[in-house]
Image (tube, coloured by chain):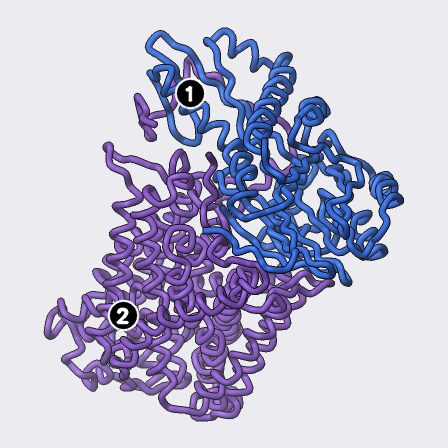
Chain colours: A purple, B blue
Amino acid sequence: MSHATFDAAAPPEPSAQVPIFSRTATGLVRQVSLLQQVVFNLASSNALGQGLVFFLSVVVLFPRANIYVALLIAAGGSFFVWTTFGLLSAAIPRIGGDYTINSRVLPPWMALGGNIGSFMGGLFGVPIFGYFMATFALSPALAVIGGVTGSHTVTTWSTYFAADHKTTVFITTLVVVAIMSLLSYFGTRLVLKVCTWLVLIAAAGFFIDLLILLFTSHDAFVRDVNNVAGPGAYAKTIAAGDKSLYPSVGGYSTHYTIGAVYYALTITIYVYWGAYLSAEFKGGGQRRRQLTAMWTAGIGNALILLIAIAIFMSTVGYNFFVSAFSGNFTAPGSAGLGNAGYVYFSSLVANNNVLVTLLALAFLGWFLPACYTQAAMCQRALMTWSFDGLLPRRLAAVSPTRHTPAAAIIVTALLSIPLAVWICYSSNFFQYFAIAAVSAYPSLVLVGITATLIKRRRPDLYKGSGAEWRLGGIEVLPVVGVLCSLVGAAAIALLFIFHTEVGLKYTRETAIYLVAMFVIGAAWWYIARSMRRKQGINLSLAYKEIPPE
Amino acid sequence: MRIRRPRQSWKRICFVTDVHGSERCFRKFLNTAKFYSADYLILGGDITGKTLVPIERRPAGWSASFREHSYADMDDEQMEAVAQMIRDAGNYPIIGDHDELVELFSPERRDETFRAAVVEGIRRWMDIADERLAGTRVQCYVTPGNDDFWEIDEPLQAAERVSFVEGKRVRLDDEHEMITTGYSNITPWRSPRELPEPELAERIRGMFEQVEDPQHLIAVLHPPPYGTELDQAPAIDEEFRVQTEGLGTKMASVGSTAVRDFILEVQPLLGLHGHVHESRGAQRLGRTLCINPGSEYTAGSLSCALVTLTDTSAEFQFTTG
């Protein structure tokens, strides 16, 4: 079919157009608000305070990187990923993630291979965020509270949650995984409600911390540091630091700025995960709706992070933070500096015990929701694989009373226990985690390929859908699809180039792992297909289009 | 690629529901017999669409707006292609000049316009079905759902190759019987075929009284059983607004207690349901395997539940074709 005129941007002629009419029928108005969809998208990424905490470590990992430029480049690259997912969600408004999208256009074994990577990334993430609750959250938060309030007891408690107290950290990790799993079991509504409130509390704390820093002049901050840590402590800290880490001495490093882009990507890119949750609602097939939700969350998060970094660095001082982060600053509560920097420094100037305590506790709110996000991804993958016949049906079992995927929740929790042992009691977990962390990027490459091929391979899904969008006569989806693939590939390449900085020791194993994902995916899929055939089920047909004519 | 036919005498059901006027989905549904090697095709209700889309005759050609796209200055062939795209997405194109469309879409006339378009759509579908299924041994069963006007019963009953099974008990083969209803429990939308739970229970019971072997019964009941994974939908208020909880959507069970009670008491082999598009899934209630294949009609994709029946069991597979 050729259209005489195709102009997606132009509105219909207002004077003459008779509007469409929809009758009252079941389900017509099952909408989520745009705000809800934006929040879904935002909550799926390492947003706001959590992003700031992770990203600030860049100043040491990538010396003299221009963190603003890195963040902007990462947001720019992520923009193509968000757009690709937004458009594909408009064409395929279903939950299920990259597997659902890719399996309709690419060979199913390939989609499964990519999804195995996403699953592994999520599975590693479950105990990681439990572990972080101890080492990144409880330990620094208690250190901040103890330091600022002068409580020796609380300060001592903070040390119990440091990484070297392995058993305490292990128990904390298990407790977090158990709480998250129990909440998941007792109801999706319940766990989402708890997570929403925790994120809101943490975000409120984050904004208050930023406001405190915003309304504290640099000179006042220096005075407060010197008051707390001793006369001249601020200048001494800068003097003690490694000057090669200071941009003010050696200028910005282009090399490390590029490296920092990898780190920034891990904070900006995951907004696309939100589409997995919200794509199915009415209106999910609307391009404008999907793109607005994606772009608002993604650009909003990046902008807030840029502003937050600017405020933080302006008040605290870049060189001082770099040196302090490197361990050259000692003051009450400074054990919390590395992992909860913005909380520590705002507490340092707030000078109010109650406020400091509340802000430090608010910081804890980031971690359980992050743990749930990872677990939910794994649970959904197990359910989807089970429904598609790739796993036993029992794994798709739901609780008859709670309506939650009980089997998938239990399996995810059980699988995370050995990983929790590994993370807490070994020294090489994070080197392997770096491998798992790269797992999500091959699926991004595949999603980009899907975007470029969907018009040819599944015209039924593309034609006339919200994804069929032209700007200046050029079809947008194939273009952003190519760029999405390039971003995914660039992220993988950056990991290998900057493997030392990001702590990836096993580069050869990583390469093998990336290939193995697809080998395992292919083997798994073909074995499952063979087994299911004996039951009269052909897995090849799961997403194969039925010819309409 | 086809499913290899097992050596044993298994029978395969292709169950589809809630196509809501998508002609593309209906044509695919008819082709599932060949594509999936299905013996029985069952369309479980809510088969008509919800939206009228005007296509306007203008001096420079035909003009329409659909799905964020504007089409203008079309010749007849191009207009027909757009009209087909509208039908394929589950809507009804209404064609005319400006004054005609204003009249047809006026508050006084639009219900009449709608019903006429729906009936015409069903006649068109039945013609396609009679043509495609002619000369095959495939059995095709259709029931209207709660959203479907009464007026469509007549063209459905008139079809030669399609069996109208609303409110009936039918025998599929030597072992299996089927009861069917597209009625639902009461919804906020007050759609045409809704019944209070006691009356719905009575309607199901009425069919069940004719069943000879409940153990091999297939119950095609449009609403899913209440309080299961198959009936979870966003909660709405009286004005159809989605309810939120925190920053998330509040979900609620919208299925039927009558259906649930019937399944728990009778324990048929299989429960085939629809109604809640979002809740694709399968869940056992006792020994009964309850399935809701969901619906993706707006995308023109057909969501199916392929069920392979043996003498004693039922294996299922979800497909999206």
Residue at figure coordinates x 76%, y 50% from the top left: B176
Say what amino acid the circle numbered 2 marks: Asp
- Vertical order, A542 against B139 (above or below): below
Residue at figure coordinates x 39%, y 67% from the top left: A522
How many labels, in total?
Answer: 2
Q: Which dot, 1 or 2, sits closer to the camera?
A: 1
CA separation, marks 1 and 2?
73 Å
- Vertical order, A275 against A317 (above or below): above
Give the image quarter of residue B148. top right
Q: Say few, some or many: other residues with alpha carbon within 10 Å of mark 1 (under 14 / 14 to 19 / 20 or more).
A: some
Q: Which mark is residue A219?
A: 2
Report the side of A459 relative to B174 (left or right): left
Q: Which mark is residue B80?
A: 1
Closer to the camera in the image, A244 or A225: A244
Q: Position of residue B125 (x, y in %)?
A: 58, 27
Q: Position of residue A309 (x, y in %)?
A: 30, 64
Q: At numbered mark 1, what does the secondary structure look like: helix, strand or loop?
A: helix
Closer to the camera in the image, B49 or A152: B49
Q: Position of residue A442 (x, y in %)?
A: 32, 64
Residue at figure coordinates x 47%, y 69% from the top left: A527
- Vertical order, A108 against A531 (above or below): above
Q: Say few, some or many: other residues with alpha carbon within 10 Å of mark 2 (under 14 / 14 to 19 / 20 or more).
A: few
Q: Position of residue B269 (x, y in %)?
A: 75, 56
Closer to the camera in the image, A156 or A67: A67
Report the side of B270 relative to A416 (left or right): right
Q: Is residue A421 visible?
A: yes
Residue at figure coordinates x 27%, y 86% from the top left: A328
Say what amino acid the circle numbered 1 marks: Glu
The reply to the same-chain question for discs 1 and 2 is: no
Q: Is residue A320 visible?
A: no
Report the side of A343 relative to A221 (left or right): right
Q: At numbered mark 2, what does the secondary structure look like: helix, strand or loop?
A: helix
